[in-house]
Amino acid sequence: MNIIKGRRATRIYENREIPREDVKKILEAGIWAPSGSNLQSWEFVVILKNELIEKIKMISPGLFGNPAMLIIGCINTERAKKGGKIGYPMAMMDVSMAFQNMMLMAYSLGIGSCPILSFNKDALRELLDIPEHIDPILMVTFGYPSFWPNPPKRRSMEEVMHLDKFGRPFEE
């Protein structure tokens, strides 16, 4: 619970590389995320070269700071088709859950992260040679944070949890 409550979106990083063994731990945490029908329709492009991260910044208005690593989460639409009508939305959830695992693992290693949705998909495809059947949907920055932000206020369980039917608060 401390890891879940401690993880924050961090945008300002120290100028420090992430050791390769920690990168591997973060990536492995991602592939162990749940996957609907075990389709594993995800693909991840891992960017460690600072020059390439700088180029991606130019097409990503939401990418701030100087992350040591950037991971682009994509949906392999050919694999997702095997899930029928729900294949693509299921793959979106799978990529999100994989990233949550990665961000929690990163935090456990003292590494911060920040998910980013604002980027130019077409420019990213061209820059990284991403094929048409691979759809980049989310990117996450990783690095050693200059500081850990304070936790934001959360809505109470009574406000957001409903017991047995909507509108009936969950009470301890």
Image: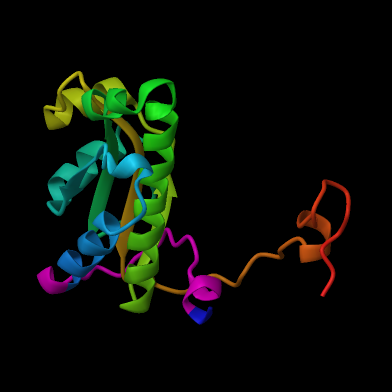
- Image quarter in which the C terminus is found: bottom right
The image quarter containing residue 95 is top left
Q: Position of residue 91 (x, y in %)?
A: 36, 36
* Span colored in magenta: 3-21
80 with respect to 50 (left or right): right
Q: Nearer the viewer, residue 153 or 28?
A: 28
Compared to residue 13, the image places residue 74 above or below, namely above
Q: Residue furthest bottom?
A: 2
Q: Position of residue 7 (x, y in %)?
A: 48, 69
Q: Residue at x 21, y 46 (%)?
A: 53
Compared to residue 132, the image places residue 169 above or below, namely below
- Residue 6 is a magenta residue: yes
The image quarter containing residue 160 is bottom right
Q: Is residue 156 visible?
A: no
Q: Residue furthest right?
A: 168
Tally of numbered discs: 0
- Residue 45 is a magenta residue: no
Q: Is residue 64 visible?
A: yes
Q: Nearer the viewer, residue 138 or 163?
A: 163
Q: Nearer the viewer, residue 113 or 168?
A: 168
157 with respect to 50 (left or right): right
The image quarter containing residue 94 is top left
Q: Position of residue 26 (x, y in %)?
A: 25, 65
Q: Residue at x 32, y 69 (%)?
A: 106
Q: Residue at x 19, y 18 (%)?
A: 132
51 with respect to 92 (left or right): left
Per the picture, the main secondary structure of the magenta-coloured stretch is loop
* Image color mode: rainbow
Q: Residue at x 15, y 43 (%)?
A: 52
Q: Position of residue 70 (x, y in %)?
A: 26, 51
